[in-house]
Image: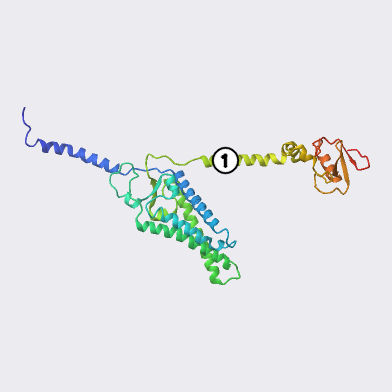
Amino acid sequence: MTPPADDAWIRSYHRLLPQSQSLNLISSHQSVIAVAISRVNQFDAARLDVEMSAMLKEQLIKVFTLMKPGMLFQYEPELDAFLEFLIWRFSIWVDKPTPGNALMNLRYRDERVAQRLGKVRTGLEGPGLTAPQKIWYCVASVGGQYLFSRLQSFSAFRRWGDSEQRPLARRLWTLIQRIEGIYKAASFLNLLSFLYTGKYRNLIEKALRARLVYRSPHMNRSVSFEYMNRQLVWNEFSEMLLLLLPLLNSSAVKNILSPFAKDKSSSAKEDTLTCPICQVDPAIPFTALPCHHRYCYYCIRTRCASAASFRCLRCNEPVVAIQREGISSGK
């Protein structure tokens, strides 16, 4: 076998170098993988966090039920801020997802560092939030919301927006309204951007470059629809009752159920002197025929006029006529 020439390796290297460089260029372009995070999951996570905070608030309010009514109303912003701080402290601060994010298989990722990474496997890699990002998240979400809520309630209590107030108070009120309008407009634009790109649900996440990504690429949404099914069934059942109850005759239903509610011995001991409709002694006593039970004239007359087949409320017999005590009269 003839040995290769001395410069064979060098010629092969120069011949394969362009192909190797093209492969490296392609791999460098493919290192950044576009990740599509479900927008519905992100919205559901935010809604679940709100529901969790409401549940904690409800349980906390029950602790103070025996105290003076309305005492917690003036401290409601502080209570909301305290609960939001607790959720932040035991979730984001310790690199854990919030309850809603955990149910939706989401976590926060520092997008600044993720964009500088080299090759990635699934596009979900990347470190969590840094300590300054966590602190600013708490300041903006918890502190900012608390301060704005307090400022709104204070300005409304002082009536800064009234025309009789001093010019300084009116200017401050106008400034608050403009800041609120600008924030809402920016939130709306960010919402449009979120619906288009799927990144950053709110302005705080956009400012901090904190993006929600999947914790595990192979984990489905861990949400149970049992509560939703129960809620839908109950809503349909309540709507059906609201539709049918006005159409039912309460007297007829009561007469049908009366044999199962009491026996004959108890019915024999009833006070036959009072009217079974209004439960008072009749001012103008009339009797129902043929059972001769005592009624008020207006009560028995109204029932007979409203129902063609009115039955006695004491014995469930059909009333064919009414008769005043001592004087005969037709129905």
Residue topped by disc 1: 232
Rendered-image quadrant of the C terminus: top right
At mark 1, the secondary structure is: helix
* Residue sitting at x 54%, y 66%: 154
Dot 1 amino acid type: Leu
Residue 21 in the image: state x and y as whole percent.
21, 41
Residue in front for this viewpoint, 50 or 18: 50
Towards the viewer: 287 or 4: 287
Could you say where residue 239 lies in the image, as x and y percent from the top left?
A: 64, 41
Q: Quadrant of the N terminus?
A: top left
- In the rendered image, the residue lying farthest to the bottom is 166
Residue 64 rendering spot, x and y as whole percentages: 55, 59
Decide if residue 118 is on the left or right side of residue 234: left
Place of residue 224 in the rendered image (x, y in percent of width and height, measured from the top left):
48, 41
Based on the displayed image, in which of its 4 quarters is residue 17 positioned?
Answer: top left
For label 1, count other residues whose C-alpha is less than 10 Å away and answer few (under 14), some (14-19) or many (20+).
Answer: few
Asked if residue 313 shows in the view, the reply is no
Residue, far right:
327
* Snapshot colouring: rainbow
Question: In front here: 283 or 78?
Answer: 283
Q: Give residue 136's quadrant in the image.
A: bottom left
Residue drawn at (48%, 48%) of the image: 48
Viewer can see residue 303: yes
Q: Residue at x 15, y 39 (%)?
A: 14
User: In the image, 276: left or right of 61?
Assistant: right
